């Protein structure tokens, strides 16, 4: 076993998740590389020191440049706001340090393309943090599709819907401003990533993107909302299948509506993240009277389940997805072999988001290859 010094930029929601994952991954997966929590960076000295104590890092800083340039920090996790991603990643790659970056990569497709170029030039491991597709159930869905268990795929429906902004009386926050913080920048990338993993590349699309609640209360009255609340994409995949995706932060009643349904010539698959330890499989076989969707509870026979638990149906959780990500990132560093999704894969998501926004503005079908 070899130690590797980890630096994490950002100590909040995702910074904590990645810190816990790096602490646990060696024990869970018996990795050859064992993370050492070397340094954490936050927006102030006080918060950085608080996170250091809480998560078990050796040192803390309020300047990401100090973290990136420190020789004991050998790999970097970016869990800070999107507008900081590009500069941090480019600085890390210039020093030959591997980077895992939270989604989405940067504020725009232009940012993410620049990050891809920096990653390619460095030749070191790079990965984007799309955690939901790593549940044992969704990994199993990929295996079923790739193994031809539901035949040739003909149709895909996916959604990422939540209701944290459904109440129009909720006050304006940072989420109310800037397209990177809207639904297409925040929620849509997760389901687009899932569609690419399950179905392959998107060739063309038409989209609608809209703001449902145009203003929200703020300290000086009503504040204008400058980004989107929901959006939908109708698309055609390169494999010929039809698709539809819907994204919303105002979907009343939905808490973690990361869900998809896939139809094939021999069967179908359904999944909903609110029941993340189950997948529904339909096989077009046997007497008609006995056909129907079968609920399969994940267990040790499904991908990446056994390291967490030996009991079928006992289940994995959100934090376990991040631990699987950490394992994959360490594997990419150790083997020098790319682990999906790389920065190039993250850029594909950003291209589709850019194409969808322009399609909505133009009100016409667009080809993804143009973006």
Image (spheres, grey):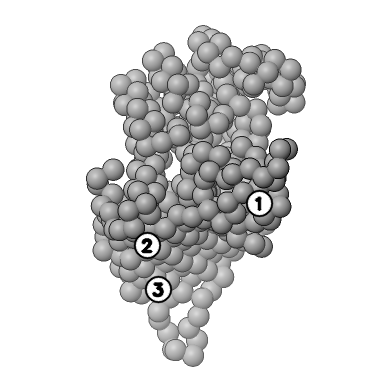
Mark 2 neighbour class, 10 Å CA radius: few under 14, some 14 to 19, many 20 or more = some
Name which residue lies at 61% across and 37% down: 174
Looking at the image, is 286 positioned above or below residue 216? below
For residue 267, the mark is: 3
Q: Closer to the camera, 102 or 214? A: 214
Mark 1 neighbour class, 10 Å CA radius: few under 14, some 14 to 19, many 20 or more = some
Mark 2 vs mark 3, CA separation in Å: 22 Å
The mark nearer the N terminus, 2 or 1, is 1
Mark 3 vs mark 1, CA separation in Å: 34 Å
Mark 3 neighbour class, 10 Å CA radius: few under 14, some 14 to 19, many 20 or more = many
For residue 234, the mark is: 2
Name which residue lies at 35% across and 33% down: 110
- Label 1: which residue? 164
Looking at the image, is 212 positioned above or below residue 97? below
Q: Is residue 19 visible?
A: no
Residue 159 x %, y %: 50, 59
Given contact means CB atoms under 8 Å apart, are the residues at marks 3 and 1 in contact? no
Name which residue lies at 68% across and 18% down: 44
Q: Closer to the camera, 26 or 139? A: 139
Number of marks in the rendered image: 3
Name which residue lies at 62% across and 31% down: 15
Residue 38 x %, y %: 61, 17
Q: Can residue 75 be seen in this view?
A: yes
């Amino acid at each position: 076993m070899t130690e590797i010094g980890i630096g994490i930029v950002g100590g909040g929601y995702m910074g904590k998740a990645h810190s816990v994952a790096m602490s646990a991954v060696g024990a869970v997966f018996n990795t050859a590389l064992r993370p050492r929590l070397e340094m954490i960076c936050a927006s102030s000295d006080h918060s950085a020191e608080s996170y250091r104590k809480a998560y078990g890092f050796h040192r803390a800083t309020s300047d990401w440049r100090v973290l990136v340039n420190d020789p004991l920090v050998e790999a970097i996790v970016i869990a800070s706001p999107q507008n900081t991603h590009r500069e941090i990643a480019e600085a890390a790659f210039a020093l030959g340090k591997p980077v895992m970056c939270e989604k989405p990569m940067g504020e725009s497709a232009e940012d993410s393309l620049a990050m891809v170029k920096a990653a390619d030039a460095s030749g070191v491991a790079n990965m984007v943090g799309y955690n939901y597709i790593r549940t044992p159930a969704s990994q199993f869905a990929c295996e079923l599709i790739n193994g031809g268990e539901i035949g040739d795929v003909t149709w895909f429906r996916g959604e990422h819907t939540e209701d944290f902004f459904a109440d129009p009386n909720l006050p304006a926050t940072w989420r109310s401003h800037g397209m990177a913080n809207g639904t297409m920048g925040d929620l849509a990338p997760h389901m687009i990533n899932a569609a690419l993993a399950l179905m392959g590349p998107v060739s063309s699309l038409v989209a609608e993107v809209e703001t449902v609640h145009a203003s929200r209360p703020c300290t000086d009255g009503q504040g204008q909302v400058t980004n989107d609340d929901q959006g939908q994409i109708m698309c055609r995949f390169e494999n010929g299948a039809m698709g539809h995706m819907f994204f919303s932060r105002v979907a009343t009643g939905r808490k973690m509506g990361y869900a998809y349904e896939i139809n094939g010539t021999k069967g179908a698959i359904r999944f909903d993240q609110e029941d993340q330890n189950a997948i529904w499989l339909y096989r077009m076989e046997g007497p008609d009277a006995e056909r129907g969707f079968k609920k399969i509870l994940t267990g040790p026979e499904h991908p990446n389940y056994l390291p967490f638990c030996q009991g079928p149906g006992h289940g994995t959780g959100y934090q376990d997805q991040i631990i699987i990500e950490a394992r994959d990132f360490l594997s990419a560093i150790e083997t020098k072999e790319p682990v999906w999704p790389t920065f190039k894969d993250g850029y594909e998501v950003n291209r589709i988001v850019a194409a969808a926004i322009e399609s909505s503005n133009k009100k016409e079908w667009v080809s993804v290859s143009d973006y």
